[in-house]
Structures are given as structure tokens and as C-alpha cells.
Amino acid sequence: MARPRFLPDNFTLMLLGTVLLSSFLPVYGEAARVLEYITVGVIFFLFFLHGAKLSRQAIWAGISHWRLHLVVTAITFVIFPVLGWALRPLLAPLLGPDLYLGVLFLCTLPATVQSAVTLTAIARGNMPAAICSASGSTLMGIVITPLLVGLLLSQTATSSDPLQAMGRIAMQLLLPFALGHFLRPWVSPFLTRHAKRLKGLDQSSILLVVYSAFSASVVAGLWSRIPLAALAALVLVCALLLAISMGLSAWLARRFGFSKEDEITIVFCGAQKSLVSGVPMAKVLFAPSVMGGIVLPLMIFHPLQLMVSAWVAGRYAQRPQDAALPAEGAAPAKA
């Protein structure tokens, strides 16, 4: 039986379990330092896999659709951060300083790749453009996110200046991504044969990084600084940000005359935020003592965006088949 669209998936439940585990059984001392080294290696491997999965043909098929990519980039790295900053008079007293910094960090992150592309496929959108746009957003985030964090967040919350952070993020994320993409012709057959196992490894890696991040914050007194009312308010704030971003993405796509297929791509690439990129970036950018509050908004936003987007994708997919005209800039279908 298919899972109802508004119920959380297994990975979301595992994320919740990881937060509970790190809250009751955090790691201390030498074990925490060992876990930190392990997570660095896990992140390297994770982004190596993402680079190896990215097809060069997909890049060239989607890259020509520059108007769509400009709109997605503007939503991801301009509208989202401005929205988070403009709502500060409301959000800062409602959430408290720790969670508000996390909301701002959420607003600076790049788009997710895997779920954005999957949702675009379900909704019969412009797949080549989605692959190119979401992957490009991840790569741009390596440069843009640290700059936005330095601009919007207080220097005391960050563990290094933006330029140093950019270099560290490039070494931990961009280098393995580029290496995986370079080695794609040799490793792709292996990845294809073991796709299901690697998906489980992919998710396990994220869970390990989340456990490490929350453990450090729990030891530093995370839950004593965040009241229950602020957590409830955070769920509503994340839902509001998601509703605004998805609604605005659809409105901009129609305002600029994009096809329905392109609108789908803009909605699912522009309104999504990446947990896979966000948690590793947070570990580089922020001190361990504030990490839990920083990534908590992202961990709430992530399952919300998946559940709501799955429902929206289903609605898009119900449109008549003959309404799906070839998208501007999409690669021609092969026989």
C-alpha cells in the first residue's frame, strides 16, 4: 500500500530518531573527536558519489535554458535570504537568537538535487533543466552560502571568516564532487549496479553527520536554551517560508511566461533547500556549541518540503497529457 503523501517517509522518521538518540546519548570527549574525523570522511565520500552520479550530457542539455536558471538562482540566493532578513523583527523575538540564526542559515542554502529532480520527473517537468539547475545551485552554494552567512549572520556565531570557510567548504565538498564527476566513466557502472545499496549508504551518512552535529550542541546545553514554545513556533515559520517560496516560484514562472514544464522545474528547484549540503556546511561555518540550533530549522523544513512537494507534484501530474508541450531549452527526445 502506498504511503499517504502527507505522512513522513522512513528517512524523516530516522532523522527524528537520530535527534532523540543524540539528545539522550550524546558523544563526549575523545569519542566526539573520533566521530568528527569520521564525519569528515563520510562527507567526502557523500559528495564524491553526488559528483559521480551527475551526467555531463544532462549538464549540456539543461545549461542552455539560462532564463530558467536565473530565476531559480534569484529565488534560492536572493529572495530567500532577503525574506529571512526582512522577517527578523517578527522571527527573532518569536524564536529566540539560536533558532533565528538557523532560519537565516536555512535561507542561504542551495537547492537540493535528488528530491528536486525526482519531484520534477513525477510532475512531468523539464528534467534536463532541473538536473542542471539543482546541480548548479549546489556548486554555487559552495561560494555564495559562506558569503551570505558572513553578510547576514553575526560574526560571533561563525567559527571562521567567509573566505576561510569558502576554502574549507571547497576542500570538503567541491573537491570530492569534482573528483567523482571526473571518475564517472569508470565508477558509473558500479553505481548503477548497486544503486539501492548506495542510497542506503547515502542516507546513513547524513544521519551520522546529524548525530555528530546534535551531540556537540546537546553537550553545550542546546535544549536548555530552546523552550518548547519556540520549537512549535519554528514549525509554523518553516511552513510559512515553504508556502511563500513555492507560491512565489509559481507566480514568477507564470509572470515571465515560462511553460508549465518550466514552471514545475522552477517550483521544485527554487523552493527546496538541501539537507545534504546544509549540515556539512554548518559544521564548517559554525562553532559546535551552536550547531544544533543552526541545523534544527533545516531538519524541520526538509521533511515539510518533501511532504508538501510530493502532494504538489501529484497535482501537476494530473494535468492532461496533451498539455505537456516540449519545454523551452529541453533536450529533444530520442527514439
Image: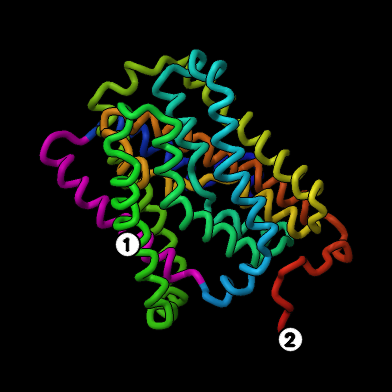
Circle 1 packing at 10 Å, graded few (<14), some (14-19), many (20+), is: many
Return the mark for residue 137. Answer: none
Left or right: residue 237 compared with residue 101: right
Name which residue type carries label 1.
Answer: Phe
Q: Are marks 2 and 1 in contact (CB under 8 Å)?
A: no
Helix, strand or loop under label 2: loop
Left or right: residue 233 compared with residue 185: right
Q: Position of residue 165 (x, y in %)?
A: 31, 45
Region of the chain picked out in magenta, as a range: 27-54
Distance CA(mark 2)–CA(mark 1): 36 Å
Name which residue type carries label 2.
Answer: Ala
Q: Quadrant of the C terminus?
A: bottom right
Q: Position of residue 85 (x, y in %)?
A: 54, 27
Residue 182 lies in magenta, yes or no?
no
Q: Residue at x 34, y 64 (%)?
A: 176
Return the mark for residue 335. Answer: 2
Q: Residue at x 59, y 59 (%)?
A: 133
Q: Residue furthest bottom?
A: 335
Q: Position of residue 208 (x, y in %)?
A: 31, 47
Q: Front-most of 308 and 293?
A: 293
Q: Number of marks in the image?
A: 2
Q: Position of residue 122 (x, y in %)?
A: 69, 59
Helix, strand or loop under label 1: helix
Q: Residue at x 75, y 53 (%)?
A: 263
Q: Main secondary structure of the magenta part?
A: helix
Task: List the residue tagged with mark 1.
Answer: 45
